Amino acid sequence: MAGKITVLIGSPRANGNSAKIAKAIADECQAMGKEVATFHLDKIEGLRGCRACNACKKRGGCIAKDPTLPILESIAGSEGIVLSTPLYFNVESGQLKLVLDRFYGFLSEDFKTFLPGTQKAAVVVSCMTGEESSEDCASHLRQVCSMCGIQPVGTIAVCDPGDEKNTLTPEILERAKDIAHKL
Ligand SMILES: Cc1cc2nc3c(=O)[nH]c(=O)nc-3n(C[C@H](O)[C@H](O)[C@H](O)COP(=O)(O)O)c2cc1C
Protein backbone atom coordinates (compact mmCIF):
# COMPACT_ATOMS: atom_id res chain seq x y z
CA MET A 1 0.00 0.00 0.00
CA ALA A 2 1.44 3.32 -1.11
CA GLY A 3 0.28 5.52 1.72
CA LYS A 4 -3.02 6.73 3.03
CA ILE A 5 -5.29 9.69 2.28
CA THR A 6 -7.99 11.01 4.62
CA VAL A 7 -10.94 12.75 2.98
CA LEU A 8 -13.28 15.01 4.96
CA ILE A 9 -16.66 15.64 3.31
CA GLY A 10 -18.02 18.82 4.89
CA SER A 11 -21.24 18.99 2.89
CA PRO A 12 -24.43 17.28 4.03
CA ARG A 13 -25.04 16.57 0.33
CA ALA A 14 -23.19 13.32 -0.21
CA ASN A 15 -23.56 13.74 -3.97
CA GLY A 16 -23.12 17.51 -4.05
CA ASN A 17 -20.44 19.53 -5.79
CA SER A 18 -17.72 19.53 -3.15
CA ALA A 19 -18.24 15.85 -2.29
CA LYS A 20 -18.05 14.83 -5.97
CA ILE A 21 -14.80 16.73 -6.50
CA ALA A 22 -13.31 15.34 -3.28
CA LYS A 23 -14.30 11.86 -4.46
CA ALA A 24 -12.61 12.45 -7.82
CA ILE A 25 -9.37 13.26 -5.98
CA ALA A 26 -9.86 10.21 -3.75
CA ASP A 27 -10.59 7.93 -6.72
CA GLU A 28 -7.36 8.96 -8.41
CA CYS A 29 -5.44 8.36 -5.16
CA GLN A 30 -7.02 4.91 -4.95
CA ALA A 31 -6.08 4.22 -8.57
CA MET A 32 -2.48 4.97 -7.55
CA GLY A 33 -2.73 2.28 -4.90
CA LYS A 34 -3.33 4.51 -1.91
CA GLU A 35 -5.67 3.65 0.92
CA VAL A 36 -8.51 6.18 1.24
CA ALA A 37 -10.47 6.86 4.42
CA THR A 38 -13.51 9.04 3.77
CA PHE A 39 -15.49 10.70 6.55
CA HIS A 40 -18.94 12.11 5.70
CA LEU A 41 -18.98 14.51 8.63
CA ASP A 42 -22.72 15.18 8.50
CA LYS A 43 -23.40 11.48 9.07
CA ILE A 44 -21.24 11.21 12.18
CA GLU A 45 -23.35 11.31 15.34
CA GLY A 46 -21.94 13.24 18.26
CA LEU A 47 -19.43 15.33 16.31
CA ARG A 48 -18.22 18.04 18.70
CA GLY A 49 -15.81 20.90 18.45
CA CYS A 50 -12.77 21.70 20.57
CA ARG A 51 -13.57 22.01 24.29
CA ALA A 52 -10.47 24.13 24.94
CA CYS A 53 -9.38 21.90 27.80
CA ASN A 54 -5.78 22.40 26.62
CA ALA A 55 -4.90 18.84 27.64
CA CYS A 56 -3.37 18.43 24.15
CA LYS A 57 -0.70 20.93 25.13
CA LYS A 58 0.44 18.72 28.01
CA ARG A 59 -0.39 15.29 26.63
CA GLY A 60 0.76 15.68 23.03
CA GLY A 61 -2.60 15.32 21.33
CA CYS A 62 -6.34 15.46 21.84
CA ILE A 63 -7.53 13.36 24.77
CA ALA A 64 -11.28 13.55 24.05
CA LYS A 65 -12.39 10.00 23.31
CA ASP A 66 -15.33 10.89 21.10
CA PRO A 67 -16.45 10.40 17.45
CA THR A 68 -13.93 12.99 16.20
CA LEU A 69 -10.93 11.12 17.57
CA PRO A 70 -10.85 8.45 14.79
CA ILE A 71 -10.82 11.29 12.25
CA LEU A 72 -7.85 12.97 13.95
CA GLU A 73 -6.07 9.61 14.21
CA SER A 74 -6.72 8.92 10.53
CA ILE A 75 -5.27 12.32 9.60
CA ALA A 76 -2.23 11.72 11.79
CA GLY A 77 -1.65 8.41 10.00
CA SER A 78 -2.08 9.82 6.49
CA GLU A 79 0.33 11.28 4.00
CA GLY A 80 -2.37 13.52 2.58
CA ILE A 81 -5.75 14.97 3.42
CA VAL A 82 -8.63 16.42 1.41
CA LEU A 83 -10.78 19.11 3.06
CA SER A 84 -14.02 19.69 1.17
CA THR A 85 -16.87 22.02 2.01
CA PRO A 86 -19.72 24.05 0.59
CA LEU A 87 -19.58 27.80 1.27
CA TYR A 88 -22.10 28.64 4.00
CA PHE A 89 -22.54 32.34 4.75
CA ASN A 90 -19.10 32.94 3.28
CA VAL A 91 -17.25 30.35 5.37
CA GLU A 92 -16.89 26.56 5.58
CA SER A 93 -19.79 24.38 6.76
CA GLY A 94 -20.31 23.94 10.50
CA GLN A 95 -19.68 20.23 10.06
CA LEU A 96 -16.13 20.89 8.81
CA LYS A 97 -15.49 23.71 11.30
CA LEU A 98 -16.17 21.37 14.23
CA VAL A 99 -13.40 19.07 13.03
CA LEU A 100 -11.10 21.88 11.98
CA ASP A 101 -11.10 23.34 15.50
CA ARG A 102 -10.00 19.95 16.77
CA PHE A 103 -6.80 20.37 14.72
CA TYR A 104 -5.76 22.47 17.75
CA GLY A 105 -4.89 19.12 19.30
CA PHE A 106 -2.11 18.76 16.71
CA LEU A 107 -0.34 21.78 18.19
CA SER A 108 1.97 22.01 21.19
CA GLU A 109 1.99 24.82 23.75
CA ASP A 110 4.36 26.84 21.58
CA PHE A 111 2.28 26.06 18.48
CA LYS A 112 4.69 23.52 17.03
CA THR A 113 2.98 20.64 15.29
CA PHE A 114 2.91 17.09 16.65
CA LEU A 115 2.40 15.88 13.06
CA PRO A 116 5.42 14.72 11.03
CA GLY A 117 5.47 17.90 8.91
CA THR A 118 5.53 15.90 5.67
CA GLN A 119 1.81 15.73 5.00
CA LYS A 120 -0.02 17.42 2.13
CA ALA A 121 -3.50 18.92 1.82
CA ALA A 122 -6.00 19.52 -0.97
CA VAL A 123 -8.85 21.98 -0.45
CA VAL A 124 -12.22 21.93 -2.23
CA VAL A 125 -14.87 24.67 -1.83
CA SER A 126 -18.19 24.92 -3.65
CA CYS A 127 -20.40 28.01 -3.62
CA MET A 128 -23.46 29.36 -5.40
CA THR A 129 -22.15 32.75 -6.51
CA GLY A 130 -19.66 33.80 -3.82
CA GLU A 131 -16.49 33.26 -5.82
CA GLU A 132 -14.37 35.72 -3.84
CA SER A 133 -15.57 34.39 -0.48
CA SER A 134 -14.80 30.86 -1.69
CA GLU A 135 -11.22 31.90 -2.31
CA ASP A 136 -11.10 33.47 1.18
CA CYS A 137 -12.55 30.30 2.68
CA ALA A 138 -10.04 28.13 0.81
CA SER A 139 -7.23 30.42 1.96
CA HIS A 140 -8.40 30.06 5.57
CA LEU A 141 -8.48 26.25 5.26
CA ARG A 142 -4.97 26.27 3.79
CA GLN A 143 -3.77 28.46 6.69
CA VAL A 144 -5.12 26.02 9.28
CA CYS A 145 -3.35 23.17 7.47
CA SER A 146 -0.10 25.12 7.24
CA MET A 147 -0.23 25.97 10.96
CA CYS A 148 -0.44 22.25 11.67
CA GLY A 149 2.46 21.40 9.36
CA ILE A 150 0.26 20.07 6.55
CA GLN A 151 1.41 21.60 3.28
CA PRO A 152 -1.38 22.76 0.92
CA VAL A 153 -0.72 21.47 -2.62
CA GLY A 154 -3.89 22.35 -4.49
CA THR A 155 -7.25 24.07 -4.32
CA ILE A 156 -10.41 23.68 -6.35
CA ALA A 157 -13.09 26.34 -5.84
CA VAL A 158 -16.23 26.11 -7.98
CA CYS A 159 -19.47 28.07 -8.38
CA ASP A 160 -22.81 26.42 -9.05
CA PRO A 161 -25.32 29.28 -9.53
CA GLY A 162 -28.20 27.07 -10.70
CA ASP A 163 -27.61 24.32 -8.15
CA GLU A 164 -27.12 21.85 -10.99
CA LYS A 165 -24.56 19.78 -9.06
CA ASN A 166 -22.59 19.27 -12.25
CA THR A 167 -19.43 21.22 -11.46
CA LEU A 168 -17.28 18.11 -11.98
CA THR A 169 -16.58 19.13 -15.57
CA PRO A 170 -13.84 17.41 -17.60
CA GLU A 171 -11.56 20.37 -16.76
CA ILE A 172 -12.22 20.13 -13.01
CA LEU A 173 -11.78 16.35 -13.19
CA GLU A 174 -8.34 16.86 -14.74
CA ARG A 175 -7.43 19.33 -11.97
CA ALA A 176 -8.67 16.88 -9.34
CA LYS A 177 -6.48 14.14 -10.83
CA ASP A 178 -3.52 16.47 -10.98
CA ILE A 179 -3.92 17.42 -7.30
CA ALA A 180 -4.24 13.74 -6.35
CA HIS A 181 -0.77 13.16 -7.76
CA LYS A 182 0.63 15.92 -5.52
CA LEU A 183 -0.82 14.45 -2.32
C1 LIG B 1 -26.82 27.41 4.84
C2 LIG B 1 -26.34 27.78 3.45
C3 LIG B 1 -25.58 28.92 3.30
C4 LIG B 1 -25.06 29.25 2.04
N1 LIG B 1 -24.28 30.37 1.92
C5 LIG B 1 -23.76 30.68 0.71
C6 LIG B 1 -22.92 31.82 0.57
O1 LIG B 1 -22.63 32.55 1.51
N2 LIG B 1 -22.42 32.09 -0.68
C7 LIG B 1 -22.70 31.30 -1.77
O2 LIG B 1 -22.22 31.60 -2.87
N3 LIG B 1 -23.46 30.18 -1.64
C8 LIG B 1 -24.00 29.87 -0.44
N4 LIG B 1 -24.77 28.73 -0.30
C9 LIG B 1 -24.92 27.83 -1.47
C10 LIG B 1 -23.92 26.69 -1.45
O3 LIG B 1 -22.62 27.11 -1.10
C11 LIG B 1 -23.85 26.04 -2.84
O4 LIG B 1 -25.12 25.53 -3.17
C12 LIG B 1 -22.80 24.98 -2.94
O5 LIG B 1 -22.57 24.68 -4.31
C13 LIG B 1 -23.19 23.71 -2.21
O6 LIG B 1 -22.12 22.81 -2.21
P1 LIG B 1 -22.36 21.23 -2.13
O7 LIG B 1 -23.06 20.84 -3.42
O8 LIG B 1 -20.98 20.68 -2.03
O9 LIG B 1 -23.19 20.99 -0.93
C14 LIG B 1 -25.33 28.41 0.92
C15 LIG B 1 -26.14 27.27 1.10
C16 LIG B 1 -26.64 26.96 2.34
C17 LIG B 1 -27.49 25.71 2.51
Image: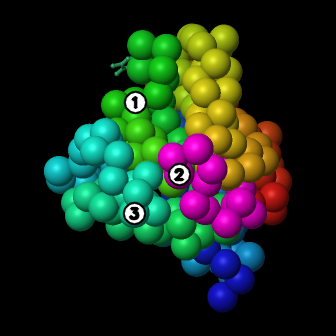
Q: Is residue 66 above or below residue 16?
A: below
Q: Residues within 10 Å of mark 1 (few under 14, many from 20)?
A: many
Name the residue nearer the viewer: 142 or 93.
142
Q: Would the CB of label 1 be found within 8 Å of ligand 1?
A: yes
In the image, ligand 1 is in what quadrant? top left
Residue beneath the point at 41% across and 57% down: 58
- Residue 111 picture location, percent across and down: 59, 44
Query: How many marks are shown on the rendered structure?
Result: 3
Q: Is residue 101 left or right of residue 110?
A: left
Amino acid type at mark 1 = Ser
The residue identified by callout 1 is: 93
Residue beneath the point at 46% across and 45% down: 104
Quarter of the image with the C terminus in it: bottom right
The residue identified by callout 3 is: 59
Q: Would the CB of label 3 be found within 8 Å of ligand 1?
A: no
By secondary structure, the bulk of the magenta-drawn segment is best described as: loop
The kind of secondary structure element at disc 1 is: loop
Q: Which residues are magenta?
A: 108-123
Q: Residues within 10 Å of mark 2 (few under 14, many from 20)?
A: some
The residue identified by callout 2 is: 108
The furthest residue to the left: 46
> Which numbered disc, 1 or 2, marks the residue that appears first in the sequence?
1
Amino acid type at mark 2 = Ser
> Which numbered disc, 3 or 1, marks the residue that appears first in the sequence?
3
Residue 121 on the magenta segment: yes
